[in-house]
Every structure is written in C-alpha cells, then in structure tokens.
C-alpha cells in the first residue's frame, strides 16, 4: 500500500511559478523515494512531504558539494532564496483553514547540541521560513532527558497524536 500526502488548495489560492516548481520537485522526490522503499515486505506508510521539509531545513545550512548533492537528490530545483520562500509558502498553505473532515498542521523543529555555535544566517533562515528556530539541548550530557524533551514537544505539537516518537536508546552521547 502506498500512501502519499497530497495537497489541495482552495480556489483562488495563487500558485506562483516557483511554488509550482517546488511542488513538482517534492512529487518527484516522493516517487524516487518510493522506488527505493517499495522492496520492503508489508505495508508502507511514509510522508515524503515531511521528509522533504526536514531536509529543506538542513539544506539551509549546507554549502558547496553537499548543497549541490542534496538539491539533486531531493529535487530542490530553485535557487536558495526562492526555494526557501516557496517551502515557506507551501507550509502556510498546508496550515490554512480546516478543509472538510481533516485539518493538517505542519510543525517543524531543529534540535541542536546546546554548546554548538550555529551560524546566525542559518538560525534566521530556519526561523523565518520554517518556524523552527533551533532548540538547544544537551544530547551529550543527558541523552535520556533530551529524548524525553523532544518526545514531549512532538506530543504537544501533534495534539497527542504522536507519542514516544523516539524510543529508548535512540539518542546516545554521540548524537549531536
């Protein structure tokens, strides 16, 4: 079974050429990823949009060959400034008014080691375009407390729909 999260926008929502290009890129990534995952036995459920958004946030801090390779694999086909604006607009459209029997809410967070010196440019980009900012915790000194804090945030952000996202021993002293 393949389940892909789709988008439907209200009539009158203006889709810019950049946003349309990003939606097509997200769809291409979704089908590429499905081609890789479909060999596993059993049912398959994944959210390519969530995966794409998570990588989009980290792409904001990538440079050089890493950024080029991420853009190629993930189908991030717009220039950086237009790309992050298009992803931001897509998140805003998803988080719009309740449509029908469901309400989709997209939430994002970046969790970083508390003593790591993130570049101001990256912090601003993740906050401005993804509403994420960087939440600083101590992975090294207290992995279990970090896991509990992340799980608590996820549970609250998903209105208790997702509990215990990260299992015991998921975070270790090597997590950064």
Image (spheres, grey):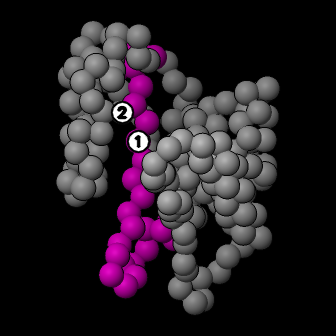
Q: Is residue 22 above or below residue 71?
A: below
Residue 75 screen position, x and y as percent? 74, 49
Q: Is residue 35 left or right of residue 171?
A: right
Question: Dominant secondary structure of the magenta stretch?
Answer: loop
Mark yes or no: residue 32 visible: yes
Residue situated in front as seen by the camera: 11 or 72: 72
**Tag 2 or tag 1, which sits nearer the N-term?**
1
Q: Which mark is residue 82?
A: none
From the viewer's perspective, is residue 27 above or below residue 108? below
Q: Secondary structure at mark 2?
A: strand
In this rendering, the answer to whether 50 lies above or below 72 is below
Return the residue at label 2: 135
- 61 magenta-colored: no
Secondary structure found at label 1: loop
User: Foreground residue, 111 or 128?
Assistant: 111
The crowding category of the residue bearing disc 2, from other C-alpha atoms within 10 Å (few below 14, some 14 to 19, many at least 20), is few
Residue at 45% x, 48% y: name it. 42
Q: Residue at x 74, y 41 (%)?
A: 73
User: Would you name the residue on which mark 1 appears?
Assistant: 109
């Amino acid at each position: 079974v393949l389940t892909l999260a789709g988008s439907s926008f209200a009539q009158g929502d203006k889709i810019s050429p950049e946003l349309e290009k990003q939606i097509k890129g997200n769809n291409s990534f979704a089908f590429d990823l499905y081609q890789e995952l479909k060999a596993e036995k059993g049912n398959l459920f994944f959210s390519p949009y969530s995966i794409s958004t998570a990588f989009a946030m980290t792409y904001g801090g990538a440079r050089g060959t890493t950024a080029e390779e991420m853009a190629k694999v993930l189908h991030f086909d717009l220039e950086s400034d237009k790309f992050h604006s298009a992803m931001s607009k897509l998140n805003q459209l998803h988080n719009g008014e309740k449509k029908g029997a469901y309400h989709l809410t997209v939430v994002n967070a970046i969790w970083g080691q508390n003593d790591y010196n993130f570049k101001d440019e990256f912090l601003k980009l993740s906050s401005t375009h993804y509403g994420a900012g960087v939440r600083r915790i101590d992975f090294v000194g207290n992995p279990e407390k970090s896991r509990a804090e992340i799980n608590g945030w996820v549970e609250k952000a998903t209105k208790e729909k997702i509990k215990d996202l990260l299992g015991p021993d998921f975070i270790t002293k090597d997590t950064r």
